[in-house]
Image (cartoon, rainbow, N blue to C red):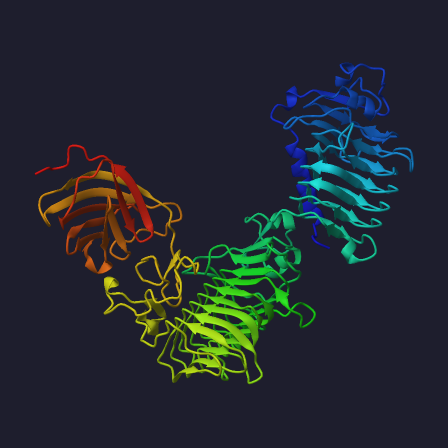
Amino acid sequence: MRDVVRVLRLIVGLGLVLGLLVTPNAALTVTYHVNAVTGDDSRTCAESQNPGTPRKSIKKGLECAFLGEIVSVSSGTYAESVESKRDGAPGAPIVLRSAVVGGAVIRPTPGADEGVFVAHSHLTIDGFKVKGGTTGMKLGPHDGGGGPVVGLLIQNNTIANNTVEGIKVTNGVQTEIAFNTVFNNATNGISYSGNSSSIHDNDVRDNGQFGIYVKDGVDHDVYGNTVHDNGTSPDDDLKILGATVAQTFYVHCLTGDDLANAAEARNPATPWRTIKKALETADAGDTIVALGGTKAQPVVCNETTIESKRDGAPGKPIAIRANVPETVIIDPPAGNGIVVSHHHHLVSGLIVTGAVFGVQMGPHDGGDGPVNGLVLDNVRVHGNSVGGVKFTNAVKALLQHSVIRDNGGAGIFYSGTGARIMNNLVYANEGGGNYGITVTGGGGHKIRNNTIYGNPSGGLRLGIDASSVASGSASDNIIVGGSVGIKEQGTGSFTLEHNDVFGNGTDYDLVRSDIGPGSISAAPGFVNPAAGDFRLGRVATGQPGNSPCIDAGSASSDAMNLGGRTAFTDKFPDTGLVDLGYHGTVLFPTEGTVTITAASMTFSQGTGNDSFTLSATLAPGAGSDGIKPGANYTELSFGSLVHSLPVSGFQPLGGGRWAYSGASTSGTFAKQPNGTVTVSVQATGLNLALSDTPIPIGIRIGDDFGSLPVKLTGTLKVP
């Protein structure tokens, strides 16, 4: 059973849908009336617009209706098979409606005819009971051929006791089937062939084969249904072979309600309370969003062990993520924090603490088999008693951009093949001889750009014992402060290059591998490791020296997918060769807006006598985390000139104002209440030449930047 809908909520939802059918111009809509008792099919269409002179049969009522018009059917039994006559139009469907929901009953010839056959596009069938036919409602293909029927809405109907199927759609497109009750049909309750269905909030039960069967197509949205006791096994309740639309479900561990149905949980205003509840419903491609507080005051969720329920699919993982990273804490009263034992899952942005293992990923559910497609991204795992993150029989699992610290036992423990352990900060994990990162065996591992610090038993362990065969590569890491920096066991071998392994009891304890090119052993020059600040020091940001790990990597930062992150305090982007170790600051390179107040330049005044002046305002772009003059890397470009203004050259003036004084550049920067920064700069001692105008001028403060071409006619000074 995929979804459970409470009866009370179903009634409320049904009322809402009925209300949506009343258009703002309802008084102007043409309505034709049908009544099984007082009707007469010899009456004209014009006469049937009067409820006192209706037609008798539904099929004769439909002969009258054109696009945007309504056929209203009074309560009673209609012994006929109803068939559509013509297309409606987008936004103006032909509406066939029971005047009272469930009051009009369609009973075709038993076992011989469909109850309702719709072979035209843009029709609505609303509020009927259909019983005793072959297929209760047969929708499509289009009249006169095999083409699609488009834009059908089937809602608030009861379809039961038909000898074949309840609702059958053939070559449907953009069909909505909602708030229907479908039961006791001989084969399928609802079957759908085509594309872009929306099948939701139906009660489908006690049908002979499948409850809801989506046979093919793409972009199906199936949610909020009560589906049970169909076919001969629970697997017969819901069978989806077509590609479904990804759904998002919301969870708030303090204000949510696990009695909400799936449709309600898709609204952040009516979330579920637990991630476990959401996992009962989430399928391949779906996302569970945990709503939280702020980074300063995260929401603490005391949910017991969160466990996966079913597999995702390649390219369509089941995702569990915090709405904003580091705003939701998972702190279980006992057991593990998060256990993922199914293929293709993503966990992102959560903090996990107070558990036995913070995060356990694999093996596959019900056994020791391998598990594929696991991603752990941007998580914080700390203070767990036995270990931080444990992978068991994982295949090409990815752990990236995360901080794993202060756990008893191993920080990261990986059993399986093809580990991708990239750009993590792993420190102060201790217990029983476990290392910061351990890879037990297997091949194809890649361990890159991690900072592994102060794990007493050791930093990086490759192979767990003498029989291990662990192989792969470890590069661009910083490994400091353990009993052993890199320890190798077993008969495998690793490519080790461009690592800084320093200050360990023993830096390397290798069996078959060699210390490769680019490797160094030097103090990495962290900003303040005692306070957990493992960013790299630079003279430009006020540290005593430049870290030897700067530009010491094996490839470019872009090639390592770190061009959008930095290892520095001032958001200086990592360009060129990648800097070693963890890049913990994300850059938001969205262009802002530059307004130029004044710009001028002198040129050809003699060697070292040229200059330019610039006054401007920089407004941040979308997604900015704020412009911080005097704290972030600053750069000015004036034509082909690029002036870098190190943070160390700024002096605070108070009131959000800073003065800058450098070798050739001086000026002031002022933060405004609206978040913009005004800039006034003069650069002297230059050698300039005349440039065709307009000249491009750019300003960058941290990762906020903007540029503007400015015409300087009349401001150039010629000697």
Q: Is residue 667 positioned above or below 302 on the image? A: above
Q: How many marks?
A: 0
Is residue 235 found left or right of 447 in the rendered image?
right
Q: Is residue 466 positioned above or below 46 on the image? A: below
Residue at image coords 31%, 62%: 569
Residue at image coords 81%, 42%: 166
Residue at image coords 73%, 55%: 1
Q: Is residue 524 among the parts visible in the rendering? A: yes
Instruction: Estimate the x, y position of residue 132 in percent, counting from the top left.
Output: 88, 38
Rendered image quadrant of residue 34: top right
Q: Is residue 525 positioned above or below 671 on the image? A: below
> In this orientation, which residue lies closer to the viewer: 377 or 160?
377
Instruction: Estimate the x, y position of residue 25 in percent, counting from the top left.
Output: 62, 23
Instruction: Estimate the x, y position of residue 81 in percent, counting from the top left.
Output: 85, 30
Q: Is residue 369 positioned above or below 39 on the image? A: below
Is residue 538 found left or right of 255 in the rendered image?
left
> In this orientation, which residue lies closer to the viewer: 230 or 291?
230
Instruction: Estimate the x, y position of residue 562 in percent, counting from the top left.
Output: 41, 59
> In this orientation, which residue lies closer to the viewer: 92 or 342?
342
Q: Is residue 98 among the parts visible in the rendering? A: no
> In this orientation, which residue lies closer to the viewer: 166 or 169?
169
Rendered image quadrant of residue 281: bottom right
